[in-house]
Amino acid sequence: MSMEKAQASQVYYQAAGGVVAHEGKFLVLKRPGRGEVRLPKGHVDPGEDAPETALRETTEESGYSALEIIADLGTQRHSFFNPHKGVQVTRDNHFYLMRLLDAERRSGEEQFVPMWLTPAEAEAALTFDEEREFVRRAAGVLAEWMGD
């Protein structure tokens, strides 16, 4: 394989998303078409910073727009092969703990079904390990604030 071809089959991007808390539960998105349960997140667009992306993507995917970032949960680098596109991907995921200010939901993306789960249920339901880690971090931040 030529070096050009090897480089063409690798992709890097930054993504940002949210762990949304409301009444002791976290928002996860079931994606039946792929058999996945995910946290809302997406690509950081040019001219956008990670917090803006996290709020935008969480709103677009879930349908919940009244959100406030309350803590930075950090960044994790993740590398994987994307079978849908046939490329090796390296992605920096940046997540924020958010709270829902108003439970009114407008229509989100049809491919996602929002579910509210306890932190333990959310951790167990999520498809990907790196997203489980962000749920653990979010639960830890909330426990500290609650004095647990």
Image (cartoon, rainbow, N blue to C red):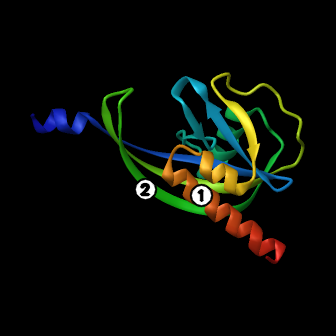
Q: Residue at x 80, y 38 (%)?
A: 65
On screen, residue 60 versus residue 7, left or right, reads right
Query: Is 132 in front, or is 92?
Result: 132
Q: Residue at x 41, y 52 (%)?
A: 78
On screen, residue 88 versus residue 28, left or right, reads left
Residue 82 x %, y % = 37, 34
Q: Check residue 77 in the rendering and tell me which mark sits there, or answer none.
A: 2
Q: Earlier in the sequence, mark 1 or mark 2?
A: 2
Distance of mark 1 from mark 2, alpha carbons? 12 Å
Q: Where is the N terminus found, in terms of image quarters?
A: top left
On screen, residue 102 versus residue 117, left or right, reads right
Residue sitting farthest toward the bottom: 147
Q: Residue at x 79, y 76 (%)?
A: 148
Query: Is 21 in front, or is 116?
Result: 116
Q: Check residue 87 in the rendering and tell me which mark sits there, or answer none.
A: none
Q: Mark 1 and 2 residues: CB-CB less than 8 Å, in contact?
A: no
Q: Check residue 134 in the rendering and tell me which mark sits there, or answer none.
A: 1
Residue 101 x %, y % = 88, 48
Q: Judge whether residue 60 can be spotted in this image.
A: no
Answer few, some or many: residues within 10 Å of disc 2's Cα (few below 14, many 20 plus, some between 14 and 19). Answer: few
In the rendered image, which quarter is residue 8 located in? top left
Query: Is 19 in front, or is 3?
Result: 19
